[in-house]
Amino acid sequence: MRKILIAACAAFLGFMTTAAEAGFQYGFSCITNRNVSNASVGSQLKVDVIDPGWGNQVRFEFTNTGAKAGSITDIYFHDANNLLASFGWIQNQTGVNFVTGANPATLSDGSAVGFVTDTPLNTQSTSIAYGVNPGEKVGITLNLGAGKMFSDVIAAISTGAIRMGVEMTGFSYLGTESFVSTTTNTSPVPVTPEPSALALGGLACLGLLRRRRKPTTEVEQV
């Protein structure tokens, strides 16, 4: 039985590390264009939309990939189909600190492109320094509505029913700019499972193995 448990745990952890998630990457376009140089920073913004693997959540990882100065300080969601039911949690990278809520509460100039902010899903950094600066990222996990799936989210993004918006500042030329995600994904992204899921799986396997282990006793020779 012990050998069977070991094999089962190895298979489970192997699956979790290779095939637990799927994701797609999207770019951003500037909707305010207050300054040409600042607006060009949008080319270094990416959002990976990821299926964590358990069916009722979706994770959005916002990344600032380039070298030009600029910090994502507020993140917004437009959800015309009401697929995103509620806020889950924030995954802050070292040097990044986002909390719930945003200021301003709606994406600046979002109405010009039909972006209606779903305010309960807003997040903001505690300062420009703790926003998503070049080389940094932040993850936001949201809960899906009853019966909704990751594929529904990707389909809604392709039609513009779900869009992601970000507010940036900290540019070389000062000022702020607003950016909205594109509807076409650039490519599938390589993703790895949640560290917490791997940790829980490993602990569960360890617990089962320890329960199966019986203490040995010495037999006295007579």
Image (cartoon, rainbow, N blue to C red):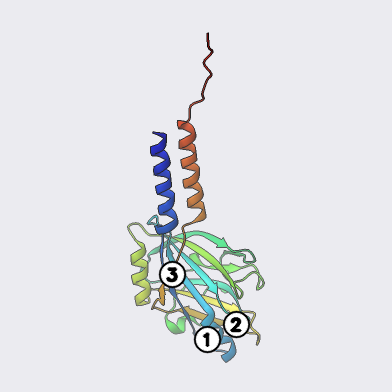
Does residue 35 appear anywhere in the picture?
no
Q: How many marks?
A: 3
Does residue 121 appear anywhere in the picture?
yes
Mark 2 residue element: loop
Which sits earlier in the primary sequence, circle 3 or circle 1?
1
Q: Residue at x 48, y 51 (%)?
A: 198
Residue 34, given in percent of the width and then of the height, sits at: 57, 89
Question: Circle 3 sits on which residue?
Answer: 189
Residue 69, given in percent of the width and then of the height, sits at: 63, 81
Q: Amino acid at mark 2?
A: Thr
For mark 3, does the 10 Å Cα neighbourhood hold few (<14), some (14 to 19), or many (20 or more) residues? Answer: some
Q: Residue at x 42, y 79 (%)?
A: 182
Question: Circle 2 sits on which residue?
Answer: 176
Task: State the residue in front, 120 or 134.
Answer: 134
The answer to which image quadrant residue 24 occupies is bottom left
User: In whole angstroms, how far apart are the C-alphas of marks 1 and 2?
Assistant: 9 Å
Picture layout, residue 141 above or below residue 112: above
Q: Which mark is residue 32?
A: 1
Question: Nearer the observer, disc 2 or disc 3?
Answer: 3
Q: Are marks 1 and 2 in contact (CB under 8 Å)?
A: yes
Which sits earlier in the primary sequence, circle 2 or circle 3?
2
Residue 101, given in percent of the width and then of the height, sits at: 56, 66
Residue 73, given in percent of the width and then of the height, sits at: 59, 73
Picture layout, residue 87 above or below residue 158: above
For mark 1, does the 10 Å Cα neighbourhood hold few (<14), some (14 to 19), or many (20 or more) residues? Answer: some
The answer to which image quadrant residue 33 occupies is bottom right
Which sits earlier in the primary sequence, circle 1 or circle 2?
1
Task: State the residue in front, 98 or 2.
Answer: 2
User: In whole angstroms, how far apart are the C-alphas of marks 3 and 1?
Assistant: 28 Å
Q: Is residue 171 left or right of residue 211?
A: right
